[in-house]
Image (spheres, rainbow, N blue to C red):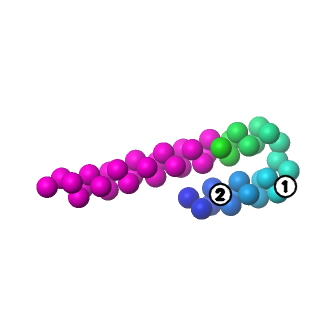
């Protein structure tokens, strides 16, 4: 997860074009959605009593 933020920071510092910014934003969004779903799945294990 932190690797995505590091990659985004490095690309911004390198002066990446605007199209690259959309790719970075998509990658961060996908990572956040995946993390949210995994947390929900983990919570469902505890609520399955």
How many angstroms separate mark 2 from mark 1 (CA)?
Answer: 14 Å
Rendered residue at 68%/46% (across/down) = 24
Counting residues from the start of the chain, the first of labels 2 and 1 encountered is: 2
| Residue 4 pos. (x, y %) | 63, 56
The quadrant of the image that shows the C terminus is: bottom left
- Magenta span: 26-49
Identify the residue at horizontal 32%, vertical 51% (top origin).
Answer: 41
Q: Identify the residue at horizontal 76%, vertical 58% (top origin).
A: 10
Q: How many marks?
A: 2
- The answer to if 5 sits in the magenta stretch is no
Quadrant of residue 19 within the rendered picture: top right
Q: Which residue is mark 1?
A: 14
Q: Which residue is mark 2?
A: 5
Q: Secondary structure at mark 1?
A: loop
Q: SS class of the residue under badge 2?
A: helix
User: Split into 4 quadrants, where in the image is the N terminus?
Assistant: bottom right
Judged from this view, the residue extending furthest toward the left is: 49
Q: Residues within 10 Å of mark 2 (few under 14, many from 20)?
A: some
Is 27 in the magenta?
yes
Magenta-colored segment: predominant secondary structure: helix
């Amino acid at each position: 997860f932190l690797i995505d933020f590091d990659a985004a920071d490095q690309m911004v510092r390198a002066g990446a074009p605007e199209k690259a910014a959309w790719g970075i934003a998509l990658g961060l969004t996908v990572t956040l959605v995946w993390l949210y779903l995994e947390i929900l799945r983990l919570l469902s294990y505890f609520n399955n009593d």
